[in-house]
Image (tube, rainbow, N blue to C red):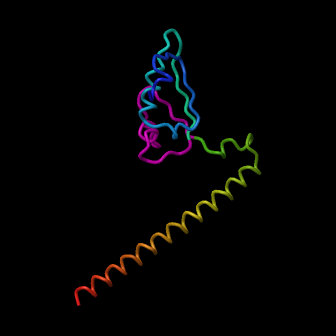
């Protein structure tokens, strides 16, 4: 089944890279597996920013009000400038600027299409009423 890979598993720690890819039910099941007796228990997560309705945003809110026993350390690529290097950061910024521009163009096109559809719908309705 869905949880058979870790059913019955008892571990002291889990590390998840990009946990935003993991559904909430898997997260809940994994948390229950951190139960190894005699060891400190810990889960480390290194996510990308999640959507506001994602379980990560709920369990680790940006305002720092985490559940007891949780700790949220927010970092950015700029915190890793020494490791990543200036060139990589410049390339990432350029790629994100292009992505943001493309998103803005898509949003504007969608808004224009919706406006045209509403205008067309109104015109058809007006013709029917004449």
Q: Which residue is drawn at 49% across and 67% down?
A: 107
79 horizontally vs 18: left or right: right
Location of residue 88 in the rendering, given as x and y in whole percent from the top left corner = 74, 49
Task: Verify whether residue 90 appears in magenta.
Answer: no
Count of labels in the image: 0
**Camera-side residue of 110 and 37:** 110
Q: In which quarter of the image is the N terminus?
A: top left
**Camera-side residue of 21 and 86:** 21
69 horizontally vs 97: left or right: left
Q: Give the range drawn in magenta.
A: 48-74
Q: In which quarter of the image is the C terminus?
A: bottom left
Location of residue 85 in the rendering, given as x and y in whole percent from the top left corner = 76, 46
Task: Verify whether residue 49 appears in magenta.
Answer: yes
Decide: is 27 above or below 120.
Answer: above
116 horizontally vs 100: left or right: left
Residue farthest toward the top in the current orientation of the protein = 38
Location of residue 83 in the rendering, given as x and y in whole percent from the top left corner = 74, 40
Location of residue 33 in the rendering, given as x and y in whole percent from the top left corner = 47, 20
Q: Residue at x 41, y 72 (%)?
A: 114
Which of the 4 image quadrants contains residue 67?
A: top left
Decide: is 11 above or below 20.
Answer: above
């Amino acid at each position: 089944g869905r949880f058979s890979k870790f059913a019955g598993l008892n571990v002291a720690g889990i590390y998840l890279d990009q946990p935003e890819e993991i559904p909430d039910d898997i997260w809940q099941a994994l948390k229950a597996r951190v139960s190894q007796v005699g060891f400190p228990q810990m889960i480390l997560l290194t996510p990308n920013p999640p959507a506001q309705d994602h379980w990560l945003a709920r369990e680790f809110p940006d305002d720092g009000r985490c559940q007891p026993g949780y700790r949220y350390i927010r970092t950015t690529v700029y915190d890793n400038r020494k490791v990543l290097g200036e060139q990589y950061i410049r390339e990432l910024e350029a790629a994100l600027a292009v992505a943001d521009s493309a998103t803005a163009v898509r949003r504007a096109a969608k808004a224009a299409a919706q406006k045209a559809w509403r205008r067309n719908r109104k015109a058809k309705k007006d013709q029917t009423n004449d």
